[in-house]
């Protein structure tokens, strides 16, 4: 049995979708500890969503294809965890909240109940959990509304709430804010922040780097299905070769780079307040 802190361990994972000629994940190895919050970045088609599917077991249980290597959750090969146990361990939120919502339920309350019924939770426990998650995500006053009447941010929060009612230990969010306006994006990140404080292990794919870097401990940088680097965000965005990959960077990092301003660890700042601090301390003749 591995280190008990190791919540997710991926070893030499290589994967190819059925009827295709190319590996979309190639020799992926990394570990995520209990309670860590990890971002995944990379250009379109680099394999971020596919990696999310592999971490939740959808690859290879739903998406077949050629699979080698192993994904361990709590030291157990994910392929050996039965589906009903798997959903209690790993929850996944897909990019589009509409594809997450069952569409069959007339109210927010029933939507959350739906997932719980599917895993056979007792009525009494169900009522308790529904109230708990809806209150936690500020959706209690919306409990009788039709899910499709909600705003994008509320709908995404409902998708997350429905998932969390199942009490997973790991939450995977694949571009949870891509369909959302700034208000909705903030709502989702506030939710993520609460979960992080509760000690949940979280994996997030997001192109909105300014937001992502404020919340993650580490970032997996994928390119063509391979891991280029797995490190703290400031290390990732300070990599000398990062420019070649044309993945962009947080605005504040871009400004610091423009003026060659680094932090005490000789890295470019990524978080907003740290960048402000470094900029304040610098003597810059601003070009306006
Ligand atoms: N079901 C599938 N069958 C065959 N190929 C697929 C399938 N889904 C994705 N791919 C291919 O696998 C590669 C990785 O796709 P994936 O969706 O994981 O990338 P991504 O990094 O999430 O991209 P994006 O930023 O656009 O969401 C791409 O080349 C894609 O075309
Ligand atoms: Mg994707």
Image (cartoon, helix red, strand yellow):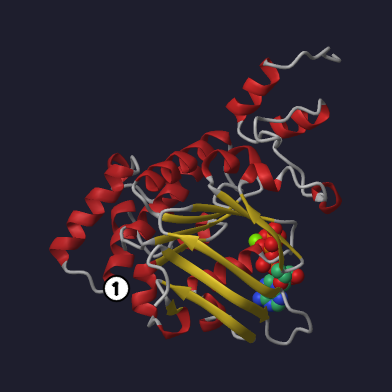
For residue 241, side relative to residue 167 (left or right): right
Classify the position of the N terminus by image quarter: bottom left
**Quarter of the rendering containing residue 107:** bottom left
Q: Residue lying furthest left in this view?
A: 124
Q: Nearer the viewer, residue 156 or 67?
A: 67
Q: Secondary structure at mark 1?
A: loop
Q: Residue lying furthest front in this view?
A: 265
Residue 221 can be seen, yes or no? no
Q: Nearer the viewer, residue 150 or 85?
A: 85
Q: Position of residue 252 (x, y in %)?
A: 70, 30
Q: Number of marks in the image?
A: 1
Q: Position of residue 191 (x, y in %)?
A: 42, 43
Q: Position of residue 250 (x, y in %)?
A: 69, 37
**Quarter of the rendering containing residue 53:** bottom right
Q: Position of residue 6 (x, y in %)?
A: 44, 65
Residue 258 can be seen, yes or no? yes
For residue 75, side relative to residue 223 (left or right): left
Would you call the spot at circle 1 few (<14 residues within 10 Å), some (14-19), or many (20 or more)? Answer: some
Q: Residue at image x 31%, y 58%? A: 165
For residue 244, side relative to residue 173 (left or right): right
Q: Residue at image x 48%, y 43%? A: 188
Classify the position of the C terminus by image quarter: top right
Q: Residue at image x 45%, y 49%? A: 155
Up/down of 219 relative to 261, above or below:
below
Report the image quarter containing ligand 1.
bottom right
Q: Which residue is mark 1?
A: 119
Q: Residue at image x 81%, y 46%? A: 240
Ligand 1 contact, mark 1 (Cβ < 8 Å):
no
Q: Nearer the viewer, residue 57 or 130?
A: 57
């Amino acid at each position: 049995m591995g280190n008990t802190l190791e919540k997710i361990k991926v070893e030499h994972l290589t994967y190819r979708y059925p009827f295709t000629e190319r590996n979309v994940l190639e020799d992926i190895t990394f570990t995520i500890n209990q309670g860590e919050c990890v971002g995944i970045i990379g250009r379109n088609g680099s394999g971020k969503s596919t990696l999310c599917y592999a971490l939740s077991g959808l690859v290879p249980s739903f998406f077949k294809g050629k699979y080698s290597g192993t994904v361990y959750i709590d030291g157990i090969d994910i392929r050996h965890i039965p589906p009903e146990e798997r959903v209690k361990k790993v929850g996944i939120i897909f990019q589009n909240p509409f594809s997450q919502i069952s569409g069959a339920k007339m109210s927010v309350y029933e939507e959350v109940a739906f997932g719980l019924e599917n895993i056979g939770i007792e009525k009494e426990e169900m009522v308790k959990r529904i109230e708990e998650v809806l209150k936690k995500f500020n959706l209690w006053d919306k409990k009788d509304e039709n899910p499709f009447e909600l705003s994008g941010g509320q709908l995404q929060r409902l998708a997350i709430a429905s998932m969390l009612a199942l009490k997973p230990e790991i939450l995977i969010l694949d571009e949870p804010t891509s369909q959302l306006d700034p208000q909705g994006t903030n709502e989702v990140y506030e939710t993520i922040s609460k979960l992080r404080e509760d000690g949940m292990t979280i994996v997030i794919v997001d192109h909105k780097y300014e937001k992502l870097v404020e919340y993650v401990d580490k970032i997996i940088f994928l390119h063509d299905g391979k891991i280029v680097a797995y490190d703290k965000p400031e290390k990732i965005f300070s990599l000398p070769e990062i420019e070649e990959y044309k993945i962009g960077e947080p605005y504040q990092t871009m400004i610091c780079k423009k003026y060659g301003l680094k932090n005490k660890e000789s890295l470019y700042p990524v978080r907003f307040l740290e960048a402000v601090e470094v900029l304040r301390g610098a003597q810059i003749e601003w070009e306006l």
